[in-house]
Amino acid sequence: MTAPLVLIDQASAIYRSLQGQSRLTLESVSLRLMPGETHALIGRNGAGKTTLLRLILGLLPALTGKVSVLGKDPVTRRTQIMREVGVLLDGRRALEPRLSGLENLTLKGSMYGLPKAELHDRAKALLDHFDLPANEPVNRYSRGMRQRLILAGAVLHKPRVLLLDEPTLGLDIRGWDLLLELIEQTNKLGGAVLITSQEISLMEKISSWVSVLERGRVVASGAPSDVLGSLGYSARVRLRVLNPAKMVIPIPPGFSWDGEFLEGPLSLEGLEEAISYLRSTGAGLVGLEQVSGIERLVRGETT
Ligand SMILES: Nc1ncnc2c1ncn2[C@@H]1O[C@H](COP(=O)(O)OP(=O)(O)OP(=O)(O)O)[C@@H](O)[C@H]1O
């Protein structure tokens, strides 16, 4: 049987405040990150996604249960583990603004224990591929360029495990392409990616496995379509109304109205009913979009 690259088994974690109070933030969480897999961690704000990544990185010890990364304890073997784990966690502190792109990557690479010559070549090649000026100080980079540099730093040492916390924040179009390429490459080489993002379409596109966190607990885990089905989050359709003033009660059954959009089940019958309602009332239609199950879950909607 293939061994997981990251194994979290019934782990709990607490944060202690300076006043000595403690709060259980993760409760009996289990998760496996398998080779070749991109695993999406989804949940509302404050659900515990970043805390879970901190647990994997050994920045927070598990109070109970077990955490193992590449077969090792991330708290006691952190330095060793970090040589095979790439991280994009908190962008704000990831770069030295007065140093150049090349110096930033070299500094980062020395922490991974890469040999000097190899590190220099790899950093230069990455900067080139990521369309970044090697010798320009980072405080003269645009926001999108800085985010691309952080992304390059995460894969400098060709990690087997890639942890990405909201990697699309501030990312430009070139950065998006690079991100998708890195994820695909990591998976192809048998590495695993754990990603959190509010970009629902991205999560649905790239993930082969989804875990849903709710108030520090994994409430569902599986293939994206199975998970959302089991939670009752089916896709819905949203119709933008041309003349909201012409909307009259009753609206079609199963639909809701928020003053701008008429939202209801994504089915042929539902759509036919909504469109004939909009035609007969004269409310009209401007556009139509699908609301995915993951988006509804992250928005905090009830099923
Ligand atoms: N350093 C800390 N000390 C105390 N409590 C913390 C700390 N960091 C996070 N928390 C709390 O732990 C809970 C989980 O936070 P976490 O950042 O893991 O959530 P998240 O799912 O990543 O949220 P978001 O999507 O907003 O980033 C929240 O209630 C948060 O307030």
Image (cartoon, rainbow, N blue to C red):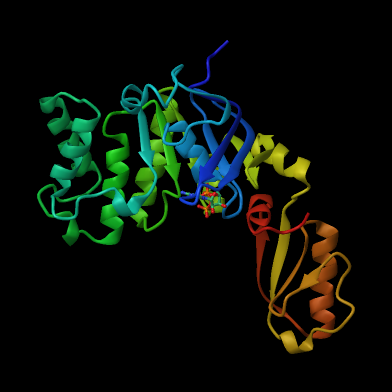
Of all residues, the one furthest to the bottom in this rendering is 245
Residue shown at the point (81%, 70%) measured from the top left: 274
Along the line of sight, the residue nearer the viewer: 12 or 132? 12
User: In the displayed structure, does residue 284 sit left or right of residue 84?
Assistant: right
User: In the displayed structure, does residue 126 sit left or right of residue 181?
Assistant: left
Along the line of sight, the residue nearer the viewer: 23 or 52? 23
- Residue 188 in percent (x, y) is at 43, 26
Q: Is residue 28 above or below residue 251?
A: above
Quadrant in the picture for the C terminus: bottom right
- Residue 126 in percent (x, y) is at 22, 39
Q: Is residue 214 above or below residue 12?
A: below
Residue shown at the point (15%, 26%) measured from the top left: 118
User: In the displayed structure, does residue 196 sit left or right of residue 221?
Assistant: left
- Residue 31 in percent (x, y) is at 59, 29
Task: State the image quarter where residue 211 is shown.
Answer: top right
User: In the displayed structure, does residue 5 sit left or right of residue 291?
Assistant: left
- Residue 252 in percent (x, y) is at 87, 71
Quadrant in the picture for the N terminus: top right
Residue shown at the point (76%, 83%) measured from the top left: 283
Q: Is residue 156 above or below residue 71?
A: below
